[in-house]
């Protein structure tokens, strides 16, 4: 259990810059996700933490111990770091039973047999796999392998726990359950955990804080709520949630309230996170849950939009459709039976919340 | 460097590790492989550029050897013949190999299981034995030639000619083409052919315009491999080309280096370097033009059964052609060896049953030299195979699974013997042993033989292990490292256990090649360092056909027993 501090970490592969100055401070016992599209540098950061890659420059410190410091030429090899790493592929050693897989690290640490057995069974119990101790990996399902991989790591009580997309090989239903289970387990054990994922709902639902990476840089590091509600830039606004970015030009401002002219000349008055000048062109992030279709008889307000409903689809509990005005399309979900309202002029209302907005470049 | 973690860490702490054993291991493996490969090449390189033998004092730099070589009319004759032979042999091998693949692996031709096994047989037999078989069967005084002459009059073929030689060599190399193409066909998606058939394409047309283009990488890599093998082939050019007065680069070297009374060492070295240079250029060209295609062949988990193309009316005519081809090139050739080994002579005028005898085999145990050559072959094969397998396994993990700074160089060095013809390996090892101080203690022992055959076949074994190593996920190593294992412990406890089957295959492959080996050891043969291959050659020179045939049968039997054991233990065939 330890605090993890990464400062100004850079990783080059030839001419390619995989990480471009990542700095991160993870508090003791915290679960932090590294989230981003593929190639953003999240797995490289994790590999650098585990010692599997030697970064080009920067500093990595875990609980006051320098793991890597380019200026002082410190590089601790992976076997001396006492980290725990769970792979996307689980990487269970196929020639060893579940028990032997867990015992490997303990034997390297010269733990006596009875203590080994106690710790392994305890770890297997924690992941509810104690009945399978004498099985070989190929005899287990994906979910079971994932649990064993975690038990194998927990058995030797690493200083920090690193998880590299450990849930992405599970099917959708199992993944939901594994999220809750993993989060509870992490809280119980209290291990400082860094979790790499490309699945935003996984990151938002499990983490204390989320670091969003893009192009080898951390673009936002905050709590899940803050990231969802107040994205730091256009990339985060677009990457998180299934909303759309709407173009507009500021017509007038009054305190918080901005009157925005949309590309099809409609005007709306909403509150924005960004206070731009009059006449400035901006992008507004609109989440699908912030827009509601209105019946024809409903009252209009300053937040009402006129548009067309297209591509209706039945989703089971609700309906989905595209709400289109001018060249802009918003995907929305609604309780209304959209098949009936499908027409050229439908009213929709934006919720009375503060919208994330960014200057348009 | 050790850094104590603070008390916050708790738990069990880190294991006590040291990186030095791993670094020592990597250094030793690199030095061993470098010695194995470079020691035989260095004297050749030096000798080509000095004016007197290596052992003489005060040598001076000189290019005279190259001048002598380039003004030697025999050299140009040999160069031209080598080119002609390599091209025609490759063409013949590709023609039969590709036809064989298409017929046996893609059509419903009858008896294809047995036929494809028979097609592979020459792969397990020494080219020296094949040469004897061709001579005993189809040579000017061969028994099949004799029978033909009695029944139909003069035989229309002459084995002792460029055409006869190329045909024999081409059919000997055709199984390699088949091996490459058939494994490529097996990984091919069968729906590609089905799609062509559904679009209205006939079976022959489908083979021609879908299957063959997909085989292109396999066709090219087997063609360049066969071309290089034809250049370095010794037995057939020597035994079949010699009587016809045909000289090749490799026989030129054999005669100048082994048979000449006072060898021109510099000339031999200069010609060797030229030959090694030509093959190196071919290897570079091969790597540039297509990369190593085998690297991307993976075991596919797809269980879809390939539908065989129906030949319809062509079925039986093609079957007859296949039977004739296999009958002539495999059954008659190997049968001739077997028949000759168990008879006192073969004559069309005396029934075979009257000539049956065990005397050829008895002759083998009559002299200690002969017994020694058999025992040596077994020892070289088993000891050399074991040492080779260990060193190859170690080289593979160091060059492909470590951060060793010299790992790329190590791989290049380990694969380089591909460019060195067997005969030149022998010359190189012979000179190295005489030239490097202290190494002469292995002269006339089996260790000089092991040195030579190991250097020659190191790339073969290496190539058998690396694809499997590539298929073992690196995450297995990484997770062991993170759990606290050093590199060496990870290789020993995690990676090595995954490699048992490929290493066993590598061992058997090496043993088979060592039992068959003759080209690299003819130069090293002396009292105490005989092998079956060298004894066969000296019997042949003495005209003892029966004993040669008996030894050949013994050699084939050794290989067959080995392969049988391997199949029993691992339930897989070595090829295919």
Image (spheres, coloured by chain):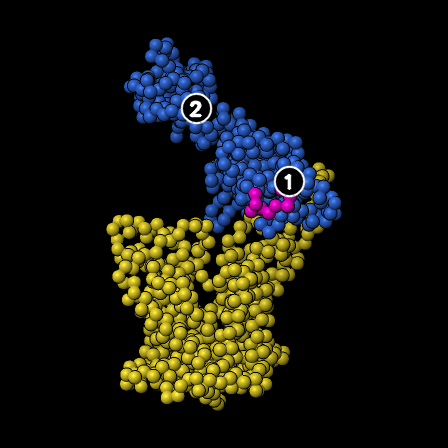
Query: Residue at coordinates 68% horizontally, 50% vertically from top-left?
Result: A108
Work out which residue is located at the far left of the displayed protein and give it. B200
**Quadrant where the C terminus of chain B is found in the figure:** bottom left
* One can see residue B237 in this view: no
* One can see residue B492 in this view: yes
**In the drawing, does residue B194 fall left or right of residue B533?**
left
Residue A95 image point, x, y percent: 60, 51
Of all chains, the one bearing label 1 is A
The local secondary structure at tag 2 comes to loop
What segment carries the magenta color? Answer: A132-140
Mark 2 or mark 1, which is nearer the start of the sequence? Answer: 1
Residue pointed to by mark 1: A131
Residue A239 position (above or below residue B336): above
Q: Chain B is drawn in which colour?
A: yellow
Residue pointed to by mark 2: A287
Q: How far apart are marks 1 and 2 (CA)?
A: 46 Å
Q: In terms of depth relative to the viewer, which is nearer, B26 or B150?
A: B150
Mark 1, residues whose alpha carbon is within 10 Å: few (<14), some, or many (≥20)? few
Provide the letter of the chain coloured blue.
A
Residue B435 belongs to the span the image colors magenta: no
| Marks 1, 2 in one chain | yes
Residue B333 position (above or below residue B1): below
**In the drawing, does residue B3 fall left or right of residue B277?**
right
The local secondary structure at tag 1 comes to helix
Residue B238 image point, x, y percent: 41, 82
Of all chains, the one bearing label 2 is A
Q: In terms of depth relative to the viewer, which is nearer, B540 or A105?
A: B540
Query: Residue at coordinates 53% horizontally, 69% vertically from top-left?
Result: B562
Query: Residue at coordinates 40% horizontally, 58% vertically from top-left?
Result: B184
């Amino acid at each position: 259990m330890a605090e993890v501090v990464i400062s100004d970490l850079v990783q080059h592969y030839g001419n390619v810059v995989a990480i471009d100055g990542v700095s991160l401070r993870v508090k003791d016992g915290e679960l932090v996700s590294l989230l981003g599209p593929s190639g953003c540098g999240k797995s490289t950061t994790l590999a650098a933490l585990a010692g599997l890659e030697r970064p080009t420059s920067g500093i990595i410190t875990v609980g006051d111990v320098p793991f890597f410091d380019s200026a002082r030429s410190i590089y601790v090899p992976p076997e001396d770091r006492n980290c725990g790493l769970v792979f996307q592929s689980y990487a269970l050693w196929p020639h060893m039973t579940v028990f032997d897989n867990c015992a490997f690290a303990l034997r390297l640490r010269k733990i006596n047999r009875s203590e080994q057995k106690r710790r392994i069974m305890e770890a297997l119990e924690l992941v509810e796999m104690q009945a399978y101790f004498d099985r070989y990996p190929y005899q287990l399902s994906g979910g079971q392998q994932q649990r064993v991989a975690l038990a194998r790591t927990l058995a030797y009580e690493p200083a920090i726990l690193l998880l590299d997309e450990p849930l992405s090989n599970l099917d959708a239903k199992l993944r939901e359950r594994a999220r809750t289970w993993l989060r509870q387990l992490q809280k119980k054990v209290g291990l400082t955990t860094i979790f790499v994922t490309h699945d935003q709902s996984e990151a938002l639902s499990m983490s204390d804080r989320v670091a969003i990476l893009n192009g080898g840089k951390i673009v936002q590091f905050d709590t899940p709520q803050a990231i969802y509600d107040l994205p730091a830039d256009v990339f985060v606004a677009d990457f998180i949630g299934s909303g759309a970015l709407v173009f507009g030009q500021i017509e007038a401002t009054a305190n918080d309230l901005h009157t925005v002219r949309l590309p099809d000349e409609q005007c709306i008055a909403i509150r924005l996170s960004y206070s731009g000048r009059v006449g400035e062109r901006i992008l507004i992030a609109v989440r699908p849950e912030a827009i509601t279709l209105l019946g024809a008889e409903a009252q209009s307000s300053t937040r009402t939009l006129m548009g067309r409903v297209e591509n209706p689809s039945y989703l089971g509990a609700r309906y989905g459709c595209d709400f289109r005005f001018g060249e802009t399309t918003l995907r929305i979900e609604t309780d209304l039976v959209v098949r009936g309202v499908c027409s050229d002029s439908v009213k929709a209302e934006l919720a009375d919340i503060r919208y994330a907005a960014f200057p348009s470049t | 460097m050790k850094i104590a973690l603070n008390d916050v860490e708790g738990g069990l702490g880190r294991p006590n590790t040291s990186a030095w054993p791993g670094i020592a291991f990597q250094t030793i493996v690199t030095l061993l492989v470098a010695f194995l490969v470079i020691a035989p090449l260095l004297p050749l390189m030096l000798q080509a550029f000095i004016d007197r033998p290596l052992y003489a004092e005060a040598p001076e730099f000189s290019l005279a050897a190259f001048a002598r070589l380039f003004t030697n009319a025999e050299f140009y004759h040999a160069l031209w013949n080598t080119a002609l032979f390599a091209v025609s042999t490759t063409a013949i091998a590709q023609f039969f190999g590709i036809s064989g693949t298409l017929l046996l692996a893609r059509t419903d031709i009858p008896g294809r299981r047995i036929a494809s096994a028979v097609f592979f047989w020459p792969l397990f037999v020494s080219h020296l034995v094949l040469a004897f078989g061709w001579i005993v069967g189809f040579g000017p005084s061969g028994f099949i030639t004799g029978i033909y002459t009695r029944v139909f009059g003069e035989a229309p073929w002459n084995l002792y000619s460029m055409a006869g030689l190329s045909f024999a060599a081409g059919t000997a190399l055709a199984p390699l083409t088949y091996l490459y193409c058939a494994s490529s066909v097996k990984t091919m998606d069968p729906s590609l052919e089905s799609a062509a058939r559904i679009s209205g394409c006939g079976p022959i047309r489908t083979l021609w315009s879908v299957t063959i283009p997909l085989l292109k990488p396999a066709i090219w890599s087997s063609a360049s491999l066969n071309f290089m093998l034809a250049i370095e082939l010794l037995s057939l050019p020597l035994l079949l080309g010699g009587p016809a007065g045909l000289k090749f680069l490799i026989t030129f070297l054999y005669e100048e280096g082994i048979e000449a009374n006072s060898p021109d060492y510099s000339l031999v070295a200069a010609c060797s370097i030229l030959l090694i240079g030509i093959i190196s250029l071919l290897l570079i060209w091969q790597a540039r033009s297509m990369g190593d295609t085998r690297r991307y062949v993976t075991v596919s988990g797809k269980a879809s059964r390939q539908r065989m193309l129906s030949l319809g009316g062509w079925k039986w005519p093609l079957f007859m052609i296949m039977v004739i081809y296999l009958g002539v090139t495999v059954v008659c050739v190997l049968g001739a060896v077997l028949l000759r080994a168990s008879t006192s002579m073969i004559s069309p005028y005396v029934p075979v049953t009257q000539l049956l005898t065990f005397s050829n085999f008895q002759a083998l145990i009559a002299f200690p030299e002969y017994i020694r050559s058999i025992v040596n072959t077994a020892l070289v094969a088993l000891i050399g195979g074991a040492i080779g397998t260990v060193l190859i396994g170690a080289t593979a993990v160091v060059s492909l699974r470590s951060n060793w700074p010299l790992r790329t160089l190590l791989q290049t060095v380990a694969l380089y013997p591909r460019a060195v013809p067997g005969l030149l390996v022998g010359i190189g090892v012979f000179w190295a042993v005489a030239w490097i101080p202290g190494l002469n203690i292995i002269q006339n022992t089996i260790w000089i033989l092991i040195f030579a055959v190991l250097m020659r076949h190191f790339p073969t074994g290496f190539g058998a292990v690396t694809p499997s190593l590539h298929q073992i996920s690196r995450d297995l190593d990484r997770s062991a490292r993170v759990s606290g294992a050093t590199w060496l412990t990870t290789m020993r406890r995690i990676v090595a256990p995954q490699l048992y089957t490929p290493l066993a295959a590598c061992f058997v492959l090496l043993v088979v090649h060592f039992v068959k080996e003759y080209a690299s050891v003819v130069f090293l043969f002396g009292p105490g360092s005989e092998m079956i291959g060298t004894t066969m050659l000296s019997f042949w020179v003495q005209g003892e056909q029966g004993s040669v045939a008996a030894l050949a049968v013994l050699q084939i039997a050794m290989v067959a027993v080995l392969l049988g054991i391997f199949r029993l233990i691992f339930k897989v065939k070595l090829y295919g």
